[in-house]
Amino acid sequence: MGKAGGDSAALINEQGLRLDGRRIDELRPIRIEVGILRNADGSAYIQFGKNKIMAAVYGPKEVHPKHSALPDKSVLRCRYHMSPFSTEERKNPAPSRREIEISKVIREALEPALMLEDYPRTAIDVFVEVLQSDGGSRCAGISAASVALADAGINMRDLVSACAAGKVAGQIVMDVDDTEDKEGQADLPIAIMPMSSQVTLLQLDGQLNDEEFHKAFNFALDGCRRVYQLQREALIGKYFGNNGGNSDGGL
Amino acid sequence: MPDLKRRFVIPGEVVGRGNLRAETNVMRVGDKIVSTRVGMAEVAHDSVRVVPLSGPYIPRVDDLVVGKIIDYSAFAWEADINSCFFGILPAQSVFGRDYSPAKDSLTDRLAVADMIAAKVIAFDRTRDPLLSISGPGLGRIPRGQTVKISPAKVPRLIGKKGSMIRAIEQGSNCRMLIGQNGVVVVVGASEDVLKAVKAVNLVEEQAHSPDLTERVSRVLGVAMPSVEQGLQESPTTTEQASDTQTSEKTPPAEGEVKESSDSEMNSAESNEGN
């Protein structure tokens, strides 16, 4: 998608507020729920602004077809898919070029966090199903998928949290939504492993100079850290009730 | 344990630092010891570990598992043990060393879809786990109802020194065999089995709630007050009752499963219980 940067004046008003009333360093409202699908080994649901995304994890399980199994580690397979009803116009449910690419980047964003060598000769399937789409669905999908993987009880080095930053109306902003993504000048989605401070996904659509890039990167990083807190709360809420935190266990 | 500190962790969270021994579900990153699972971190004075609250069954040597025969070749059966790895039961371990494919037929002993109680005798992730059905309480399971629970909740279902399993068995008048892989076999009269299954599911759903044993006893008691009364008034009568039931169940033809040894097995497992 081209970054035209058309009538950018309306995107951020004189008070420095964006179209949906956010400040430039504000995230959209986020809600994460864990373990909502009974049939999956692990699952999570995320609302990230207008995004509504389900993530389901199956496995580790035996690999079919058998020849695709690896002798020393598990095969991670990801499928990012947008439902036909997720967009304004009906979307053809067949996987598009874009969805295939996003499936690949989600897999590569999650892989470093997983201890795949603990499950040789098996496969782990991750399904990211977009029920309603807004900008930044790959980031929301990664965040949800990582929570679903933790819910499935797969050994992980860290969670993965993702968030985007971008350039809208000449300003660097945190967490671009759909309109800002289309009308804005740049979109920078990143995913990190928050505890070990490593980047597992970094894409940039549009142009940023050095200074802008650093600012945008730090905005996105800050967003990831906030997403991480919500992921943590969601996981702890499911397994320990909402008294969460670090009180003495009820076991 | 008095000097055991417990706390909830998620993957990536630091559980401890420095010269602690990293036990299960943790990994060392430089000076830090980090959890790899959602669970309860237990920090003792010299070691740390995380007790996971979810996750698949990964076989360990000496585990008792309940499996289902799904296939067989000339030399071994393959069993579904509710894991991402299939259990291999070599024909030699059933027929003895002089097993020959020409002379013996595997299907005479175990057919596809038979349930077995087996022990894991070898496993190291590079190969499928090796099973054995020779030993007290092991072998073909002739009857019963299977219930699957999360393998992470097996210790809870057994309870401290087997308290939970005992409560359910006495409350429902059933015998239970709990595999470490999360497969539970319940044997008894059909309405009793329904009660026991209900209790097992209750344990799985409310695994974290305190005084669960009491709650389970109550559920079983409410479901059938006469049994509860009988239990409270004269424990000896119920013991006798379950004894007679055991002898009724044990079929002469299928002596491989020795029901009476179940309790020994359960108490051995209960060391795992927390």
Image (spheres, rainbow, N blue to C red):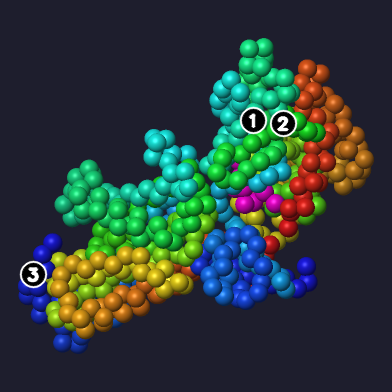
Dot 1 amino acid type: Leu
Residue B133, numbered circle? 2
Quadrant location of the C terminus of chain B in the rendered image: bottom right
Question: Where residue B202 sits: x, y (%)?
Answer: 65, 48
- Residue at 78%, 43% (x, y): give it: B266
- What SS does tag 3 mark? loop
Q: Which residue is mark 1?
A: B89
Is residue B202 visible to us here? no
**Tag 2 and tag 1, C-beta contact below 8 Å:** yes
How many numbered circles does the render carry?
3
Mark 1, residues whose alpha carbon is within 10 Å: few (<14), some, or many (≥20)?
many
Which of the marked residues, 2 or 1, is nearer the chain's N terminus? Answer: 1
Determine the CA span between mark 2 and mark 3.
70 Å
Question: Where residue A189 sits: x, y (%)?
Answer: 27, 68
- What SS does tag 2 mark? loop
Q: Which residue is mark 3?
A: A4
